[in-house]
């Protein structure tokens, strides 16, 4: 999560989807705060007032075993304050920044077929079939600044991984306008805030997503997704 600089008063938080939907101007005390940040590779600015700022939440993924999830569920049930002791290994956690909605948009613009587009959406949205309420309970909610956590079973993860490997992201990105500004404008959803070539930013995050799922599939792990 992108944190406001010291001395700034936080008014709210937003995701890239909020920016695209026009909800990024979060108001407090009658003042608007603009969300201009997309992570380490994106310019971050404060809001319209010197004493205000916005926290930009980014998408997180963790690949874990069924046993680990069961242990966390058990810990939450036995803890007086519902602490699941959620702490996946750093090597098994991926920060996708604000790339998810931008990747989805590129695939839509390229006319990607429904099967592969749905796989990408599942890769970044997860599924609500697995009950993760114990990971979304105060004061130990893992994603207190975003929607409820979701997950994909090991079988779902394997299928999504198979389809991600089949996707030709370089070709889809190459179909964008050659000019960086025009490409970002076409993508929308805050892509114009990316510093440099949006294609490099998106390819980097797509490759990370694909490799993350491939590793999970090879190890028969499930995926948990949240925003923080």
Image (cartoon, rainbow, N blue to C red):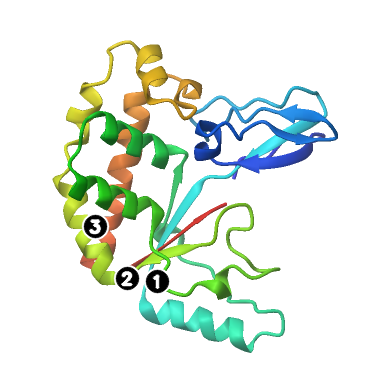
Residue 208 spot, x, y in % from top left: 32, 45
Tell me: 92 left or right of 226.
left
Camera sees residue 197:
no
Q: Residue at position x 34%, y 37% from top?
A: 103
Residue to which mark 3 is pinned? 160
Query: What's the distance in space between the residues labelled 1 and 2, CA to CA?
Result: 9 Å
Residue 179 spot, x, y in % from top left: 33, 10
Camera sees residue 15:
yes
Q: Are marks 1 and 2 in contact (CB under 8 Å)?
A: yes
At mark 3, the secondary structure is: helix
Residue to which mark 1 is pinned? 129
**Crowd tier of the residue under label 2, counting other residues whose Cα lies within 10 Å: few below 14, some 14–19, many 20 or above:** some
| Residue nearest the viewer, comparing 209 with 101 | 101
- Taking the view exactly as shown, the residue that stands out farthest to the left is 166
Q: Is residue 151 above or below residue 79?
A: above
Residue to which mark 2 is pinned? 153
Residue 39 spot, x, y in % from top left: 52, 35
Query: What's the distance in space between the residues labelled 3 and 2, CA to CA?
Result: 10 Å
- Between disc 1 and disc 3, the foreground one is 1
At mark 2, the secondary structure is: loop
Residue 218, image quadrant: bottom left
**Crowd tier of the residue under label 1, counting other residues whose Cα lies within 10 Å: few below 14, some 14–19, many 20 or above:** few
């Amino acid at each position: 999560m992108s944190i406001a600089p010291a001395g700034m008063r936080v008014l709210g938080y937003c995701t890239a989807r909020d920016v695209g939907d026009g909800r990024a101007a979060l108001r407090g005390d009658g003042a608007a705060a603009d969300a201009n940040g997309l992570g380490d590779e994106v310019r971050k600015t404060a809001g319209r007032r010197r004493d205000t700022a916005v926290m930009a939440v980014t998408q997180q993924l963790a690949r874990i075993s069924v046993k680990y999830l069961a242990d966390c569920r058990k810990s939450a049930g036995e803890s007086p304050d519902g602490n699941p002791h959620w702490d996946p290994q750093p090597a098994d956690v991926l920060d996708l920044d604000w790339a998810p909605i931008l990747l989805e948009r590129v695939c839509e613009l390229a006319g990607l077929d429904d099967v592969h587009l749905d796989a990408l959406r599942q890769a970044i949205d997860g599924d609500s079939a697995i009950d993760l309420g114990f990971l979304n309970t105060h004061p130990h909610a893992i994603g207190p600044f975003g929607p409820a956590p979701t997950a994909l079973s090991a079988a779902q993860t394997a299928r999504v991984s198979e389809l991600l490997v089949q996707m030709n992201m370089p070709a889809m990105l190459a179909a964008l306008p050659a000019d960086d500004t025009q490409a970002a404008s076409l993508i929308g959803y805050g892509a114009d805030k990316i510093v440099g070539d949006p294609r490099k930013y998106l390819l980097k995050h797509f490759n990370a997503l694909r490799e993350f799922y491939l590793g999970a599939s090879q190890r028969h792990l499930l995926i948990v997704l949240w925003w923080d």
